[in-house]
Structure formats: C-alpha cells, structure tokens
Image: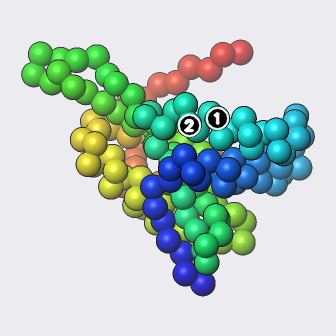
C-alpha cells in the first residue's frame, strides 16, 4: 500500500467531510443529521475557510484515509513584528485500520512544514490522551503557561 500526504484543496471537500463523518460515527455517536447533508454542509464550510483552515489529506492507493487541519490566526502586531501569526492543529484523524502505521506522523510532518513556511510563532494542539505521544514525537511539548477556558 502506498500512502501519500498532500495539501488538500476545495476539490477534496467531500473526502474531508466523509472522513469527519466517519470519525464522529466511529464511536457510535449520533451525528444528528444524515451523512449526505453533512458532507454537503462540510464542503461549503471548507470552501469558505480555505484561507484560515489549511487541510491536509492522506491517501492510500487513491483513497482518503486521514486528515489534519492547521488553523492559522492573525495575532496583534508588535512594533518590530507587524505581521504575527500562530496556528492550531485541529481534527487529526486516521482511519482505524491505519493507526500506528506512520500516517499520523506523515500528516504532522506536512502540517509543521507548512507552519514553518508560514513563519508561525507557535502552533498548539488539543490532544486526546491516545495521541499525545504522536504530537510529542513531532516536537510538541507541554507548556505550563498555557491556560484554557471552556464554556459551561
């Protein structure tokens, strides 16, 4: 099996939506809508957010098997840095049959290469416990200064 990772485009929106659907339904969760309606909504969502949500797609023998997203945000300018940006890794998903095969690592390599080319100041990720080691191998570290807030 040959796996390739590449930047996704608007033409990949349906495949990305299908992966997101699979992720949500994989655990038996009720998605709250029909698959076709969600994929259509997701495709429109992708098209509207391409400038800020950079998608990456992994394919095995031409079939979409994994995705990752890099959300890029503008930061407040500083006198010496009029352009400041940061990133957040989101919705990294690998189909169950290819987990622990290196696909996730290849996705993160592509995401972080783009982050470097964009000169992002920092990149964050919110991880499940299972995936922490993947992100640590990619160079992420725990940061004792990072705080989060969640609505109740």
Label 2 vs label 1: CA separation?
5 Å
Q: Quadrant of the N terminus?
A: bottom right
The one nearer the camera, 43 or 87, is 43
Q: Residue 97, can we see it?
A: yes
The residue wearing badge 1 is: 44
Q: Residue at x 28, y 16 (%)?
A: 76
Near mark 1 (Cα within 10 A), the count class, few <14, some 14-19 or many ≥20, is: some
Q: Are marks 2 and 1 in contact (CB under 8 Å)?
A: yes
Number of labelled discs?
2
Near mark 2 (Cα within 10 A), the count class, few <14, some 14-19 or many ≥20, is: some
Disc 1 secondary structure class: helix
Q: Residue at x 33, y 46 (%)?
A: 115
Q: Quadrant of the C terminus?
A: top right
Residue 46: image location, x then y, percent: 58, 38
Residue 114: image location, x then y, percent: 34, 50
The one nearer the camera, 7 or 123, is 7
Please say if 35 is above or below 138. Answer: above
The residue wearing badge 2 is: 47
Please say if 34 is above or below 26. Answer: above
Q: Left or right: 20 with respect to 134?
A: right
In this picture the colour scheme is: rainbow
Please say if 138 is above or below 81. Answer: below
The one nearer the camera, 50 or 30, is 50
Q: Residue at x 58, y 68 (%)?
A: 59
Residue 22: image location, x then y, percent: 77, 53
Q: Left or right: 76 with respect to 26?
A: left
Most distant residue in the front direction: 11
Please say if 152 is above or below 86. Answer: above
Q: Residue at x 81, y 54 (%)?
A: 26
């Amino acid at each position: 099996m040959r796996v390739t990772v590449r930047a996704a485009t608007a033409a990949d929106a349906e495949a990305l939506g299908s992966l997101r659907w699979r992720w949500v339904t994989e655990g038996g969760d009720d998605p709250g809508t029909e698959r076709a309606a969600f994929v259509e909504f997701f495709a429109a969502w992708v098209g509207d957010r391409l400038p800020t949500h950079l998608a990456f797609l992994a394919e095995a023998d031409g079939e979409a098997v994994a995705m990752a997203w890099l959300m890029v945000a503008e930061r407040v300018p500083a006198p010496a840095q009029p352009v400041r940006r940061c990133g957040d890794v989101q919705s990294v998903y690998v189909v169950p049959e290819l987990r622990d095969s290196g696909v996730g690592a290849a996705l993160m390599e592509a995401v972080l290469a783009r982050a470097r080319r964009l000169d992002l100041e920092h990149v964050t990720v919110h991880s499940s416990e299972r995936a922490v080691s993947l992100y640590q191998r990619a160079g992420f570290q725990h940061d004792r200064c990072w705080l989060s807030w969640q609505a109740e």
